[in-house]
Image: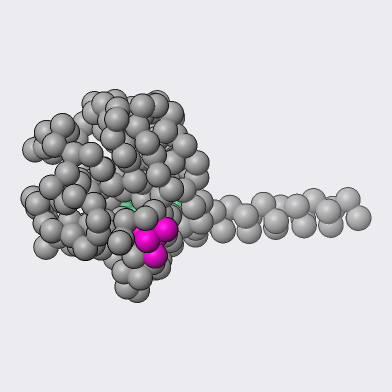
Amino acid sequence: MKKNVGIIIGIVVVVIAVIAIIFMFTNNGGSVGLDSSIQNEDNKSGNTTLDSDRVLVLYFSETGNTQKLANIISNEVGGDFRRIEPVEAYPTGDALFDYTEEEANSDARPEFKDLDINIDDYDTIFVGYPIWWYQMPMIMYTFFDEYDLSGKTIVPFNTHEGSGDSGTYSDIADLEPDADVLDGLAIRGGDMESDQTETVRNWLEDLGFYE
Ligand SMILES: Cc1cc2nc3c(=O)[nH]c(=O)nc-3n(C[C@H](O)[C@H](O)[C@H](O)COP(=O)(O)O)c2cc1C
């Protein structure tokens, strides 16, 4: 009898854990949706001590949270602004989970559209992405494979639903061993529903980017 109770409790705990994990990943309470009015732009002036002629803000975003964060950062630091767009659009809804899990398991390198940049034009590159399956989306690995960021300063940022940066900042340092990777900013996707400008400014201040 006692053994049966133990088994039942075990099953209940596992079921609750699975529901919690699914909820964590799919909690689109936080998803703001991609905003088509947020476009690639060149040479916006910024409010920091960074030379905005030599700054690039680059991001990948599927459901809009990272796009919104990237836009706030871009408004603050200026420079060129680009979205990493997959050549083949990702499936939506539940299919996205199976598709991207397979992509991660097979160590895929999904292609992205031409970014229309010359990487030599930049000294400081802000790079943003969501956490997918506890790591960067595989399309970010394509980016780091294609671009040699040696000698540049990389400033990572990401959105997530509980995993923080999930070790991705040190993954970037491994992928770009001759770049200087600064302390990143990780924000919950759900928190992008409210204005995160102050959070961004505090982070940029900690990095020493204001007078
Ligand atoms: C396929 C998939 C996998 C995810 N995996 C994780 C994860 O491992 N850890 C986590 O904290 N959040 C995970 N999330 C949540 C996203 O990181 C979060 O919703 C993020 O804000 C989405 O950014 P975006 O709107 O810019 O695409 C996942 C979301 C999706 C769609």
Q: Nearer the viewer, residue 28 or 172?
A: 172
- Give the residue furthest to the right: 2
Query: Which percent across, then down, holds residue 55?
Result: 20, 46
Residue 41 in view: yes
Give the quarter of the image for residue 118.
top left
Query: Which percent across, then down, holds residue 58?
Result: 23, 46
Check the picture and name the quadrant holding the N terminus.
bottom right
Query: Which percent across, then down, holds residue 165?
Result: 46, 48
Q: Is residue 115 left or right of residue 183?
A: left
Q: Name the residue located 21 percent from the left edge and 31 percent from the top edge.
A: 111
Query: Which percent across, then down, holds residue 82?
Result: 16, 47
| Span shown in magenta | 202-206
Q: Name the residue located 23 percent from the left edge and 52 percent from the top edge.
A: 50
Q: Does residue 58 lie above or below 45 as drawn?
A: above
Give the quarter of the image for residue 69.
bottom left
Residue 71 in view: no
Q: Does residue 120 lie above or below 23 as drawn?
A: above
Q: Is residue 125 magenta?
A: no
- Give the residue furthest to the front: 211
Check the picture and name the quadrant holding the C terminus.
bottom left
Q: Name the residue located 25 percent from the left edge and 59 percent from the top edge.
A: 48
Q: Does residue 55 lie above or below 144 as drawn?
A: below
Secondary structure mostly taken by the magenta-highlighted segment of the chain = helix
Q: Nearer the viewer, residue 92 or 72?
A: 72
